[in-house]
Image (cartoon, rainbow, N blue to C red):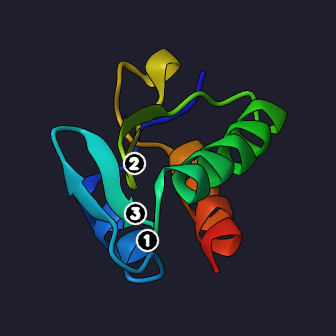
């Protein structure tokens, strides 16, 4: 079972995660693309990365926008190191 991070640990990690925020026990970020196809291509790349990490984010899509929420179910829906790791991987995919 993953250990939830405390507020200081989360805030420290957010310093390395451009545009991510912490609210409602989730790391969250909205990504905008030029069109639906580009958004779905990114969604697919994120899905492969998440599956490789055995982590399954909450993802909402509306046309050219994806909103991603990360927390760890087996840690009671709290943010853990696994969420930070996936957010960093998502940032690498976005660049």
Residue 21 numbered mark, or none? none
Can you say whether 79 is above or below 36 in the image? above
Residue at 43% of width from left, 35% of height from top? 59
Is label 3 in contact with label 2 (beta carbons under 8 Å)?
no
Give how far apart the Cα atoms at labels 3 and 2 are. 24 Å
Give how far apart the Cα atoms at labels 1 and 2 are. 10 Å
Numbered disc 1: secondary structure: helix
User: Residue 70: percent from the left, percent from the top?
Assistant: 43, 41
Q: Nearer the viewer, mark 1 or mark 2?
A: 1
Is label 1 in contact with label 2 (beta carbons under 8 Å)?
yes
State which tag comes first along the sequence, 1 or 2.
Answer: 2
Can you say whether 32 is above or below 61 in the image? below
Q: Nearer the viewer, residue 24 or 36?
A: 36
Residue at 46% of width from left, 70% of height from top? 34
Residue at 28% of width from left, 66% of height from top? 8
Mark 2 — residue? 5
Q: Nearer the viewer, residue 89 or 74?
A: 89
């Amino acid at each position: 079972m993953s250990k939830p991070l405390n507020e200081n640990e989360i805030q420290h990690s957010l310093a390395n995660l451009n545009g991510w925020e912490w609210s409602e026990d989730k790391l969250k970020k909205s990504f905008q693309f030029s069109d639906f196809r580009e958004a779905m291509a990114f969604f697919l790349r994120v899905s492969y990365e998440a599956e490789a990490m055995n982590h399954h984010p909450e993802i909402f899509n509306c046309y050219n926008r994806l909103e991603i929420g990360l927390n760890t179910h087996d840690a009671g829906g709290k943010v853990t190191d696994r969420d930070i790791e996936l957010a960093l991987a998502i940032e690498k995919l976005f660049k």
